[in-house]
Amino acid sequence: MDEKALPSISLVTCSYQQARFLDATIRSVLDQAYPKLQYIVADGGSTDGSLAIIERHASALSWWVSERDRGQSHALIKGFAQATGDICGWLCSDDLLLPGALNAVATFFHENPEIQAAFGDSIWIDIDGNPIRPKREMGFNRFVFLHDHNYVPQPSMFWRRSLYKKVGGIRPYYSIAMDNDLWERFSAVTAIGHIPKYLSCMRHYSEQKTLAGKWKKRGRREGSLVTKRGSRFARHRCLRPVLHEFARTLRIISKCATGSYWAQVPADVLLWLQRYQTPALSNWS
């Protein structure tokens, strides 16, 4: 695609005490060499060496801050307040963008001007960056999304900035399910597309916020609020388990039909992950 036709992309990375992963995350974005990238880093005042990592990459960042904030949602809100790109997305500081992801996103939105939001597939990786399994997804189905679970891989979701403004952006009172809440509001006003390509790697490890004790419980509560807001049927306790089983069955059938459950991590991704592990990541202490 001609560079002049490329949409500008604003990407926000939120971070707090994630020095172990932050350098790899930032490099995975900058190595895209996307010519119209606005890369924003919002750190919550980390004291673990994150600031030195950010400063090392500062000349390549469009905007960054390292200061105390009120949590992940607040950091993202600050970041997106700086965003000027046609297309937006966010990448948490323990996740990675796969090579060519931003070009794939730009091409998709350029070729599909009617689509306001779209997500690609992802790869689950462990704490050391080793692949666990691919997360190859079905297209967006609002019923399944509401009544089974939020299956959209967050770092592989991108949207037009005009849509983000239309729905009011990220809400500060969601601490865990801010993505779930945002996707639901997107899907209430527009269709969500699917980019059949692996765009990101999502790290899965026991110390993750979404897997830890009280945060996991809070995430479930927040997700339940999103479901009840999006579906009046989910407000009836007796209907919820029935709707869940039906949505889960529909999801399984859809993924079986596309071979998603038998997908393998692509060989080029395996090679990239092996080469991408540097002392800055694997030997951090």
Image: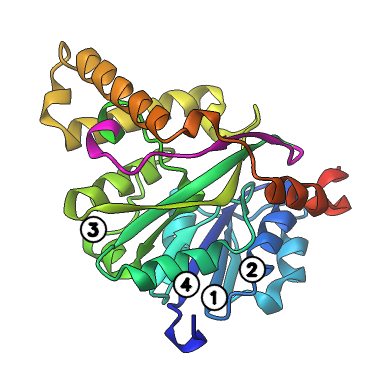
Magenta run includes residue 50: no
Is residue 38 visible from the viewing direction of this image? Answer: yes
Q: Is 102 above or below relative to 148?
A: below
Which circle's residue, 2 or 4, is located before the other in the chain?
A: 4
Q: Residues within 10 Å of mark 3 (few under 14, many from 20)?
A: some
Whichever of callouts 3 and 4 sits on the residue coming sooner in the sequence is 4
Q: Which mark is residue 167?
A: 3
In this view, the residue in front, 128 or 98, is 98
Residue on which the image places disc 1: 37
Lower sequence index among marks 4 and 1? 4
Question: According to the image, label 4 marks what residue?
Answer: 9
Q: Earlier in the sequence, mark 1 or mark 3?
A: 1
Cα–Cα gap, marks 1 and 3:
23 Å
Bounds of the magenta segment: 128-144
Is there CB contact under 8 Å for labels 3 and 4?
Answer: no
Say whether marks 4 and 1 touch (CB < 8 Å): yes
Q: Residues within 10 Å of mark 4 (few under 14, many from 20)?
A: many
* Mark 2, secondary structure of its residue: loop
In this rendering, position of residue 102 left or right of residue 274? left
Q: Position of residue 186 (x, y in %)?
A: 26, 52
